[in-house]
Structure formats: C-alpha cells, structure tokens
Amino acid sequence: MTIALWWVRRDLRLSDNQALSLALNRAESVIPIFIIDPLLMDGSSPKREIFLKNGLISFDINLRNIGSRLTIRRGDPLEELSKLQKETGADLIVAERDYSPYAKTRDHRVADVLPIEFTAGLTIHPPSAVRKPDGSPYTIFTPFMKAWKKIPAPSKPIPSPKSLPRIPEFLSIPVPAVQPLDCFPASEDAAHTVLENFLNSTIYTNAQDRDRLDHEGTSRLSPYLRFGLISPRTLISCVNQMMADTDNQGNLSCLSAWLNELIWREFYISILDSCPHVLSGPFRESLCNVPWRDSPSELSAWQDGRTGYPVVDAAMRQLNQTGWMHNRARMIVASFLAKDLLINWQEGERWFMRQLLDGDPACNNGGWQWSAGTGTDAAPYFRVFNPVLQSQKFDPNGEYIRRWLPELKNFPDAYIHTPWKAPLDVQSASHIRIGSDYPAPIVDHHFARLRALAAYRTGVSG
C-alpha cells in the first residue's frame, strides 16, 4: 500500500487543498501531520499562537469527522519527518510550497534527504510565473498587477473530500485548549462564514469604505489567509464569478478594488521571494543611511498607545488587545513611528510581528517599507501622514477613537482629534485632564515633519 505524509504548514483546511489533492492522487493512505517548529514558534506572537492552537484543534475535528486525524510533533522538521517516515513506512511527503527565506532553506534541507513534492496553494500564481519579459521580477505594483491579470484564471477550487482513509494512531502531541479569540474564531467554517458575510454585504461598499476606521468596510480575512484556513483561490474564484455576473459599474469597481488588495498580497510574497534582503534592511539601498533616533521612551509610548495623538493611540490599543488593525490605521501608525518619531521602521515591523494575528513576513515587511518610504513601490519619503488630518478624514465623528480610548468617550467632536487644544473647562466637563488622564502629544507634527525630511535627505545623500 502506498502511503503519503501530508505535511500541513500554512494550509489548515480541507477545501481547495492542493497538497491534500496530490497526496490522495499519489497514495492509497494519507497521514496528515503538523510539526511545531521551535524556530518559528519561540518568540512568536502570543495571539497568533492562540489562533494557531485553536485552528489545529478545529482542523483535527474536521479530519476526524471524515475518518482521519491530525498527528502533531514538535522539533526540527527534518528530524521529525525522518522519524515519521520510518514509523509510517511512507513512500512520499507532500506539502504546499512557501516562499519566505526560512521556509525555502527548511524545504531544501528536507528535499535533499527525503522524497518530498511541493504544490501550489499559498498564492494564486507562483512568484516565478509573474515576471518581466526578461525573466526578472517586477518591483512596482501596477506592472505586476497587469502581468498577474494576464495569466489565465486559476482552475476552480477543489471540494473538500467526503472521507479520508482511516489510519493507525501515531504518537501525537496534544494541543492544549486555549480561550478562543472573540473577534476571530479559528476554524475553516469560520473563515467561510467571514467570506460569505463580506460578499453578501460589505464588498459593495469596500471601495468607498475600506479606509474608514469607523466602518466595518474590510473583509477581515487576513488571519484566515495567513494560516490557510481558506485558500486564496477560493477568494479569487468568488470575485471572478461575481464580476462575470454583473455589468453594474459601481459593483465592478468595488470587486476590482478588492481583487487588487489580494494581488498586493501576491506582490509582496513575490518581492520577498526574489529579494530576501528586505527582511534585514531597506529595499531601496539609497535609504540605508537614514539617521534614525534611538528613543526607548517614545517607542514604548507608541507601542502602548500613549502618544497623545488619538488616532495613533486607538489603533495601537486595538492591535494590542485584538491582534488586528485596520489597514489604513496600519499606515497611519507606521508613518507616525518612522517619520514623526524618526524611529527605525524595523522596530515597528518587529512589534507588529509580535502582536498581529495575520503577521506574515512578506506582507508585514512590505507594508512597513511602503509607509517608511524605503521599499519597493513605496510612498515617497517626503510623504508624511498628518495624524490629525488622517483622523478627521477617516474617523470623522471619532467613533473609532472613542471605541478604543474610553477615557475620551465624553470628549466633544470638536476636540476629539486634537484633545490637547481643548480649553480647561471642556476638559473638566469631559472628566479628563490632558497631560494627566490622557497624554499631551509627545511631538509636534509640524516640527517632526521637517525633522524627518531633513533626516531622509541626509540618508539619501549619505
């Protein structure tokens, strides 16, 4: 009997799983395995670990419902796979290909020793498929997006199997039950419910509302994509079908806007695949010498949501409490750290990876370098977000601010974006004193903008 080890990594799902499909086509018995890699888990985000544990528990339940089970081990992947191959007599290992520098090194080590085959699934089109005519990678989004869209649409998602071959029970580490995260239940069913709700309601306001902090205008699917509780092909298939079914230009615009967001994810994965140095420094080497400030107290204030700028603080508290943050908010807080405080964007990149449920090396790095002006297709370094104007535009009534900064809940609209400007009688009526109950701004934005421009010019010339 032919036996395949199905090495699950970032594909905790049964539906549209190309690695599972390959295993079923190549073997009579398929053994699902997950290896907890200490090099990835140790020092990871506690919230992301909770999400993963709940996802593993849910995934194992789904496997048992169709006759199988998940075997979990902890240790070096090559060592554990070698042990499992001997224990099970497996002829083949299958896995979904990943593109981070660590994943590629890990997978090369395994492929040098064990019979393993990799499949697509992490992206719609593998990075090698979206290239310039000369074979070099795209480093600007718009040409990448146009080339991406010219590639034939992917085949339809693969349905979940109704049953899997029963397998013997092997030694497996139990996953301790942990309290689920209220905002993001970690299961394949939950991922599809989130998608369905988005497609049935929010997507047709996405183009207009996706930047509004006070609206639920985004899909909130990023944590599910991060761990593969839903496949990108499922999302693209839904969008393509909806675009084919409508001739309403407004709806097409909304669908196209969301499709481009999904392509941004593929773009950043492609950048990391071809330019792994971005994880250790700027993509734009001309900005390697920016004289960043070392200010532990200001970095801590930013991390904790104590900068005195309500929109920045609300966003950071949302991140710290939930492990998620609206994309517009991510840009605002990133610009504030790198340009208003002139603190190295890599400090923010590291903090996000310790907090985010959807913390993905490619997308997190791409977003930070875009905001800092150091990356591919980045905002120019002289573009400095004004946190007050951003707040007024994308949270006009202060609803987002009040939700995450309850100390400002009684502040009047006229001062909710600039509480330090409120007269003392307004502060007293709101039961809060600026500088005591809520901090005064730790930096003047006008001064900070000029300082940042001078520093970036120095970095470029240096």
Image (cartoon, grey):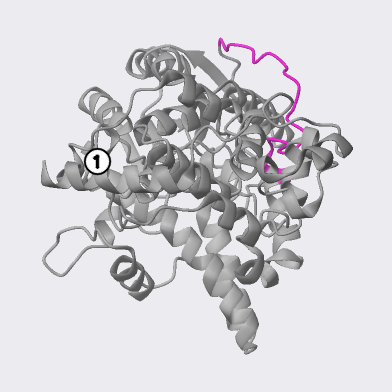
In the rendered image, residue 148 lying in the magenta stretch gets the answer no
Any part of residue 68 in sight:
no
| Residue type beneath disc 1 | Pro
Residue at the spot 33% in from the left edge and 42% down from the top edge: 451
Q: Position of residue 124 (x, y in %)?
A: 42, 58
Looking at this view, is 442 or 338 the one in front? 442
Above/below status of 201 relative to 223: below
Residue at the spot 42% in from the left edge and 35% down from the top edge: 341
- Mark 1 highlights which residue? 282
Above/below status of 244 relative to 448: below
In the rendered image, residue 185 lying in the magenta stretch gets the answer yes
Above/below status of 87 relative to 422: above
Q: Which residues are magenta?
A: 171-190
Any part of residue 169 in sight:
yes
Looking at this view, is 2 or 375 the one in front? 375
Q: Main secondary structure of the magenta part?
A: loop
Considering every residue shown, the one lying at the far right of the view is 429
Looking at this view, is 22 or 213 the one in front? 213
Q: Position of residue 447 (x, y in %)?
A: 41, 44
Residue at the spot 57% in from the left edge and 12% down from the top edge: 172
Q: Position of residue 184 (x, y in %)?
A: 71, 38
